[in-house]
Image: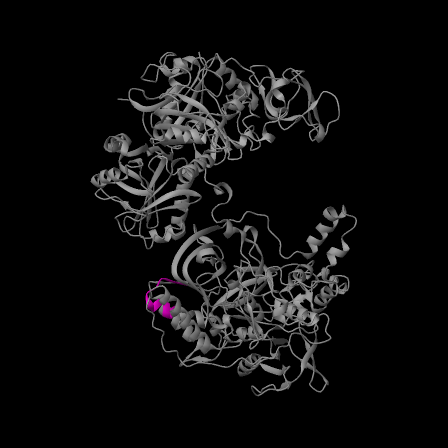
Amino acid sequence: MTQINRITNGQTNPDQRLEFTFDGKTFYGQGGDTLASALLANGQRLMGRSFKYHRPRGPLTAGSEEPNALVELRTGGRQEPNTRATTAELYDGLTARSQNRLGSLKFDLLSINDRLSNFLTAGFYYKTFMWPAAFWEKLYEPIIRHAAGLGSLSKIDDPDLYDKGFLHCDQLIIGAGPAGLSAALVAGRSGAQVILADEDFRMGGRLNSETFAIGDQSGADWATATVAELATMPNVRLLPRTTVIGAFDHGIFSAVERVSDHLAVPATGKPRQILWRIYAKSSLLCAGATERPIGFENNDRPGIMLASAMRTYGNRFGVAADKRVAIFTNNDDGHRTAADLHAKGVKIAAVVDTRPDAPRSGDYEVLAGAQVIDTKGRLGLTFAEVREADGSARTLEVGALGMSGGWNPNVHMTCHQRGCPVWNDTIAAFAPGKNLPVGMAVAGAATGAFSTAAALSTGAKAAAAQLRHLGFQPKPPRQPKTEDTPTNVTPFWYVQGCNRAWLDQQNDVTVKDVKLAHQEGFRSVEHLKRYTTLGMATDQGKTSNMGGLAIMAELAGKSIPDVGTTIFRPPYTPTSMGVLAGRSVGRDFHPTRLTPTHKWAEEQDAVFVEVGNWLRAQWFPKSGETHWRESVDREVIATRNSVGVCDVTTLGKVDVQGADAADFLNKIYCNGFAKLAVGKVRYGLMLREDGIAMDDGTAARMAEDHFVVTTTTANALPVYRHMEFVRQCLYPDMDVQLISTTEAWAQYAVAGPNSRKLLEKIVDQDISNDAFPFMACADITVCGGLRARLFRISFSGELAYEIAVPTAYGDALIRRIMDAGAEFDVTPYGTEALGVMRIEKGHAAGNELNGTTTAQNLGMGRMVSKKKDSIGSTLSEREGLNRPNDLRQIGIKPVNPADPVPAGGHLMNATGPVDAAHDQGYVTSAAYSPSLGHMIALGFLKDGANQIGKRMRLVSPLTGVETEIEIASAHFIDPEGNRLRA
Amino acid sequence: MHDLKPISALGGVSDTIGTMTITENSGVALASVAARMGGEVATKKALKKLLGDVPGPGRSQQHDPESGFWMGPDQWMIGAPMDTHELLADQLKTLLGDAASVTEQSGAWVVFDVVGAALPDMMERLCAAPVRTMVAGDTQRTVIHHLSCFVIRQNGADHVRILGPRASAGSLHHALNGAAHSVA
């Protein structure tokens, strides 16, 4: 197809012919085109269907504020919905499809909605789909979602990479239009570290869309020359294709750089986009302004667009929106479009100016005091109906109509920290308020100073002021002579009497919808937004908010500033989920922690389980074992009968040193530590300040002034953080030093009746029961001299040790243990067997220390020392935590050994109702005990200590389980503790 | 003399990607030193003698054979060649006595040397440390791929040393390589 609307003198490159497809049809564009400009060049005005009524739509704008021309770009895993054709940079091979249609773009079956528009008004869903309630999820919502969605997802994994990055600068300049470029020149020459970011692929902003000169150059040439000068400065970083999407605390901004979106496929290993976090000592917002449309009947037909967009297509892209155009304006700026296009040979049917004193701007007809009252054309504009000042009607035959309702400064970024814009009567728009984010200034059209001269001078001045504040000595240059037209606008929001006049083309919100909302009592602008959806979705109302506010103000008899604005929030423009995730996707979603035995365990075919970021061996299947229970039962039996070994490196290890180390532990543990002898380990229970159990573990006294504290795996970090808080904030006068050594040591539990015999082959010192009794600890050496630590502690209830060596030796040690233990059939066991054995022994773990339980509940009430003050001890004495029938940890076994005892089940009396009011307790941990041959469980039961032997029901109404159980001691195995002391 | 063979987290892996070379340095012994209450002056005096100077906040002291960096108030990490200083913690404890608490840290960290012309570009894809403006000896604790790391600007112009948690060495290495590819 030929580019029938391509006219000469654009800034695109005619020598670079780019082939692309839209809805399967092949087109050609030029280097420097956007998808929208290339389609318009080919006479393709129709680019999409509207959200609700499926009305045919073309581009309203030429920029990121676009509500209409949303397309799906690319295919397969790279398919991206809701992409604005007006910002999509054309490349050779681009594939684009229209979206939100049933059938083809020209014959959308859902355009029937447009005929039903009398029913589909504001609040339609709220009013219609109320009854019956059950229909919502199964019927209404799927239908609505299908009909009213925008683009579709491919549901294929995105193959591209996304990076995150961090930048630092003295000054971040947001927007590279005349104000931003002028500011960057001043800042760059001053030597400051400067970042200049612009969402466009070509810097220059409106300068590329206008024809007026700066000095003796065209604006676009001045922009090109300025960018070239900035590019030579090592202290200036130019970020084209980069949208600053949010202003956050402390001068931090986020920005998305589209590194590869203008390429068919990113280069190998290169990201598609980068999410930059920018630390800026100062920021200068030069975001420009957005033109406003005007509300009139059927103002949404393809071909009707903002007058400034029409000018951009003409001047920058060399594309006429049509051969015959008209302009509808309430200000002088609209006349510029007519003049520029007229100069390019486009036929100007008329400039329809609402102002009775409209100026003449060129050799074409100006209809002063006239209004466009309706349009015609099924898939695009063919006629515009005009009512002239004297009331007579006139029809203009045009293929494009430019609307100019004045300009709104882009204040969004000034409001990201709840700053409110203020009304400016001169420009009839909101301008930035005084309450800006810290370190921010605003320049150029974003302040409401719309002329090029004002942009250049305010940009330079604002930059210089900020830089001086930072200690630089900037020298603002003499500004070149350029356009300095005053703003001349008479507010005109919509044509009186119109109904289906579109305010928000993205959400199909009309003037009538806003009136209806007001009629139904919606007064707050925030409520108006939610009820009508005005200003929602991908364009966030950049072209529609003001129109809605103006109508609300008129209906309420208020001024626009009294009606107020909705709050602008980040992101400024739609942001892909991929770039928010960065590299943290799939397997790399979080970092993985590997234990020192990981490589060896892989060799043993271990099955791994995620424990936080750790991967721990869950069990070690042997050939022939078909079910995990077989492996786990074998590991438990082997350990209880001979010896097993388990990697317990993941338990937190905190090194506590200092003259007051023992006193410090006395504070963080509820039981006493001051008198613990050197060379001894003690079990310790930590309470929260409110008296609830926080974590348990052991503390080994390696020397008078040195303890090694262990924590549970899950709480390693929270406990260390807690201890640092206590050290720094509660007891800063204590001489105590803390450091985590969790990963510094490889630590293995060696458990079972033969554990001593095994370790005697490795440990260089005497570890007989006399020399190294239960709860002993020592710095030792192994294998002829390697420094190591040995603790005689037991989680399994067996004779057991934990042995630790520096991590680098962890692999060698596990292999040595397995070799030395071969004669005892030493068996590696994983976290499942570990869990079974601790349940058999009645040891509490995370399921019991669940954030609701106290020392009393855990049966450890007497551990809370009354002889000292420790964290949580006072509040643990609260009446409510010390009632006679409080929950107590107990054991549970089935009356019929074949019955299950599921974790999570609740305990009910043998007879009586099963409901929450009669709940007696609950099961926390359950396992099959290979030692006993039936399931066992731990749980909490009211007055549990006095209920041993009682028969009850264990119920789980959700899973349909009801089992007769007997309350037992939590210590199923060796309750006297003979084994671990052997 | 024992016969157990130590292994490093990643077997001393070294990759060259574009201009960047990322190498696991398994030859660094580490120990933390925290001055005890009242021992601050004695600790600093001993460290000054050992390192030539006592690094302040955000700084490291590059010195041979021992070097060190500031980790917190009156707290430093000391490093030295593993070949000669495997028992660094013991050696420091002998030197410092009751003036400071010393903890062996060799096994807790994986050490990467990242060298090459694209260093600042690569580092800004990894962490918030302002590597472009950091000079030799500047040291920052920062987050790389969710992992708490130390980033130390070395004397070589294009060289940083990164200390990260050893158990996550593989994840950290993957992140470093990914960033190197991004800027290659």
Picture mark count = 0
| Residue A558 image-quadrant placement | bottom right
* Image height of A660 relative to A7, above or below: above
Horizontal relation, residue A815 to residue A856: left or right: left
- The residue closer to the viewer here, A812 or A476, is A476
Instruction: Looking at the picture, tell me which residue is in the foreground, A399 or A143.
Output: A143
Where is residue A630 shown, x and y percent of the image?
55, 20
Would residue A471 appear left or right of A979 to someone viewing this image? left
Does residue A45 appear in this view? no
Image x and y of residue A591, in percent: 45, 40
The quadrant the C terminus of chain A occupies is top left
Can residue A515 be found in the magenta stretch?
no
Q: Which of the 4 image quarters holds residue A801?
A: top left
Q: Is residue A188 magenta?
A: yes
Question: In the rendered image, which quarter contains the N terminus of chain A?
Answer: bottom right
- Which region is colored magenta? A184-195
User: In the displayed structure, would residue A506 be above or below residue A858?
Assistant: below
Q: Nearer the viewer, residue A847 or A438?
A: A438
In this picture, is A724 found above or below A178?
above
Where residue B30 sits in the image (x, y, percent)? 30, 36
Q: Is residue A195 visible?
A: yes
Residue A334 occupies quadrant? bottom right
Q: How is the image coloured?
A: one colour
- Outermost residue on the right side: it is A132
Left/right placement of residue A272 relative to residue A503 reads: left
Residue B6: x and y in percent read: 32, 29
Which residue is painted at 59% across and 48% down in the image?
Answer: A155
